[in-house]
Image (cartoon, rainbow, N blue to C red):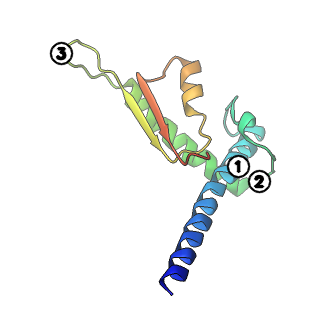
Amino acid sequence: MADRTMEKSAADSRSNRAAVQATNDDASASKLSCVKKGYMKDDYIRLFVRRPVKRSPIINRGYFARWAAFRKLLYQFLDCEGSNEKGHMKKQILSLGAGFDTTYFQLQNEGKAPHLYVELDFKEI
């Protein structure tokens, strides 16, 4: 009986993991929908989307609102002046579970990339 319980638990864990990973594709498709409708600019997201979809205006606006709020905070962090004993603070970003996030590429293009940018996600992503 314990073996069956462990097998079911492992299968549930794989299923949950796959469900979480599937949100990556959905989010990327939604971001591309926003870009195509002109809500935001992202020259890279199309490279990560296999099947483009058209989202409703409320979904596009929701993604845009989240993107705009995150961008504002991100730029505030990167633009704030701080210093250490050498006079310049090296900024770092750790992105957990970001999926196919294109923020690093955008920051690099804008000349705003931090000293270190690390993304951690499932190995499959």
How far across and how far down the image is residue 109, in percent? 59, 19
Q: Write down the residue under mark 1.
A: 30
Circle 2 SS class: loop
The kind of residue on which mark 2 rests is Arg
Q: Is residue 102 above or below residue 80?
A: below
Residue located 69% across and 36% down the image? 45
Q: Is residue 72 above or below residue 86?
A: below
Q: Write down the residue under mark 2.
A: 55
Residue located 68% across and 44% down the image? 31
**Position of 1 compared to 55: left or right?**
left
Which label was assigned to residue 108?
A: none
* Residue 13, quarter of picture: bottom right
Q: Earlier in the sequence, mark 1 or mark 2?
A: 1
How far across and how far down the image is residue 106, in percent? 59, 27
Q: Write down the residue under mark 3.
A: 85
Number of other residues with Cα within 10 Å of mark 1, as a class: few under 14, some 14 to 19, many 20 or more: many
Q: Is residue 58 above or below residue 50?
A: below
Q: CA distance from mark 2 to mark 3?
A: 49 Å
The kind of residue on which mark 1 rests is Ser
The kind of residue on which mark 3 rests is Glu
Q: Disc 2 vs disc 3: which is toward the camera?
A: 3
